[in-house]
Amino acid sequence: MRQWLSSYAYFVIPIFSWIMAQVAKIFIKGFLEKDWDWRYIYRSGGMPSAHTTVIISLCTVLAYRLGTKSPEFGIACILASIVMYDAINVRHAVGEHAKALRAVIPEVFKKNPPAGIIIHQSNGHTPLEVLVGLFIGVIVPVLVFIVT
């Protein structure tokens, strides 16, 4: 197991971190909002940001394995900043647009929207959700390296 994890750490640990973040969503929603829905395991949005968790866990693995001066670590950090910016700003704007479209469509089509128009709404993340995703993205790989 140790050898397998060592060989695939750059792939396995971020996936494992993503699973931990998604499972955390179930418990956070359950305890805070009494909404115990297992479907949060695959939904985007909410607390914590699983996108942030994945990319930060990759950064953590790269820092541990190759060092913080490696080009791979630098590339991962740049990608992490893009992912976190996107999670807070771009996805939030898309969620607001979806909310506006859902309100306008019935009016435009006089309460009878054409079949097949489904507008899914996924809100972006708050800075706190991204921060918690960052925290999980560091903690999970560190714990995996301690245990293995």
Image: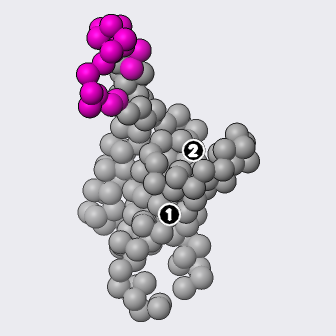
Residue 1 circle label = none
- 117 falls in the magenta region: yes
Disc 2 to disc 1: CB gap under 8 Å: no
Mark 1 sits on what residue?
A: 19
Name the residue rendered at 72%, 43% in the picture. Answer: 34
**Number of labelled discs?**
2
Which sits earlier in the primary sequence, circle 2 or circle 1? 1
Answer above or below: position of 128 versus 103. below
Residue type at the position of mark 2: Met
Q: Quadrant of the C terminus?
A: bottom right
Residue 47 circle label = 2
Q: In this rendering, would 112 be left or right of 17? A: left
Element marked by disc 2: loop
Camera-side residue: 53 or 97?
Answer: 97
Name the residue rendered at 26%, 63% in the picture. Answer: 71
Can I make out residue 89 in this image? no
Answer above or below: position of 95 versus 112. below
Badge 1 local density, few (<14 within 10 Å), some, or many (20+)? some
What is the spatial separation of the Cα atoms under label 2 and label 1, in whole angstroms?
13 Å
The span picked out in magenta is 102-119
Name the residue rendered at 28%, 56% in the picture. Answer: 75
Q: In this rendering, would 135 be left or right of 92? A: right
